[in-house]
Amino acid sequence: MAKQTPNPNATGSGGILVSAFDAGSTAPLENASVSVWRTTAGEAARKGAAHPPAATDFVDIGTTQSNGRLQFDGLAPMTYLVVLHHLQVKGTPIGGASPQTV
């Protein structure tokens, strides 16, 4: 399973469902690391995955399942930066970030 312990930083009732797929083959990305950070839409767009928010803005981290999905629950209404890290897809390191509003 992707997440096995309750999130101690959870403060609300919203959620984000992450679906991670290879852009070329559309195969699901299993075991991709996904982190969630508190942020604003402007900060998320400006910083992106290369410069995540401060450690104090960390919310949760998990790993995608065999179907490429991971659910983050218990999120308060606001904008979060969702960062995907996956070691390799067809020999090329990948990653990405996307602002999500709950």
Image: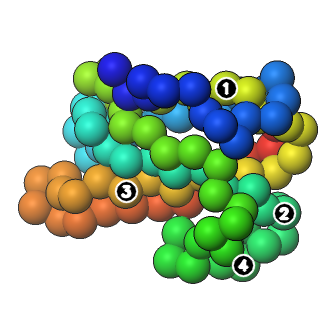
Is residue 13 toward the left or the right of residue 82 in the image? right
Q: Quadrant of residue 51?
A: bottom right
Q: Nearer the viewer, residue 73 or 6?
A: 6
Asked if 35 appears above or below 21 in the picture, the reply is: below
Foreground label between 4 and 3: 3
Is residue 76 toward the left or the right of residue 45 in the image? right
Is residue 37 toward the left or the right of residue 84 in the image? right
Q: Which residue is mark 3?
A: 85
Q: Nearer the viewer, residue 21 or 102?
A: 102
Q: Which residue is mark 1?
A: 73
Classify mark 1: helix, strand or loop: strand
Q: Quadrant of residue 101?
A: top right
What label sits on residue 16 in the rendered view?
Answer: none
Farthest residue to the left: give it.
Answer: 91
Farthest residue to the right: give it.
Answer: 77
How far from the left and from the top, in percent, is residue 98? 62, 55
Q: Earlier in the sequence, mark 4 or mark 1?
A: 4
How far from the left and from the top, in percent, is residue 93? 23, 65
Q: Which residue is mark 4?
A: 46
Q: Earlier in the sequence, mark 1 or mark 3?
A: 1
Q: What separation in Å lies between label 4 and label 2 (alpha carbons)?
A: 10 Å
Q: Amino acid at mark 3?
A: His
